Image: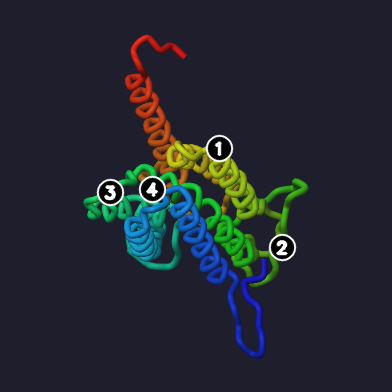
Amino acid sequence: MYPSFTVSGYTFYFYPIFMIVGAAVCIGIFVGLTYFRHRKRGAENGYAIGMLGIAMAAALPAAMVFDSLFKMAENGGKFIFGGATFYGGLLCALALWPILLLFWRRRTVSVYERLCDLAVAIPAGHFFGRIGCYFGGCCFGAPTNGPFGVVFPEGSAPYEFYGGPVAIHPTQLYEAAALLLIFAILFFFGKKNAFPLYLILYGVARFIIECFRADDRGGLFGLPLSPAQIISIVLILLGETILLVRAIRAYRGRPAGKTS
């Protein structure tokens, strides 16, 4: 709710602080899972972690490019940098990292297993990012008379957007709570299917939360859904397809005559 604080004359902004913390948490959990689940794969694990760092570094400019593309219509067709969207960074990292992993020719851990490890870590790191959004005032919600309404202070993005103090949905906190739940589900129950389950669970959560948001997220092809909702649908379908394919392969791989 408050974008910054000052210590000894130096101003620190919550949003980048929480972004850095989130990235560190994501990498930390991934590293822990990697060395716990794939023991004796030291060099291969180190390569996977290094390539993840490269993919995450590329994700930030990708997030900014996606945001600019979504808002081109509202900007009179001009491509203007001014924000970032999580989905842009996520899609970039999930596309680039598997490709980089393929360059390790003596793989003993499949790319799918690596993606499942990463899928557990993403919502934990993303949680801190959304807390940063809350303090920064971005990604804010629509007005509400409900018990969870929050009034952002003067000078914040919601205050300026609505022209005064208005109680709005704290969509950042809604999503943070959903991310914690997703992390718990994947950590305790989703080892072999964490990646497709993440795509489905986060896709559903993000689609619903978008219904309560009111900040400018741009448009896509003139559709009534927000860009994030369209991407959410694609991710949900992709996750379901992966689960279906894995189920079919498991069924075909059963011993003959086995029915349960």
SS assignment at label 1 = helix
Q: Which residue is mark 2?
A: 165
Image spot of residue 93 (x, y percent):
36, 55
Marks 2/1 in contact by CB < 8 Å: the verdict is no
User: In the drawing, what numbered circle is on residue 107?
Assistant: 3
SS assignment at label 3 = loop
User: Distance between the Cα atoms at labels 3 and 4?
Assistant: 11 Å
Q: Which residue is mark 4?
A: 114
Marks 3/4 in contact by CB < 8 Å: the verdict is no
Marks 1/4 in contact by CB < 8 Å: the verdict is no
Amino acid carrying label 4: it is Arg
Amino acid carrying label 3: it is Arg
SS assignment at label 4 = helix
Q: Which residue is mark 1?
A: 189
**Up-down relation of residue 53 to residue 248 (above or below):** below
**Up-down relation of residue 1 to residue 171 (above or below):** below
Q: Nearer the viewer, residue 164 or 87?
A: 87
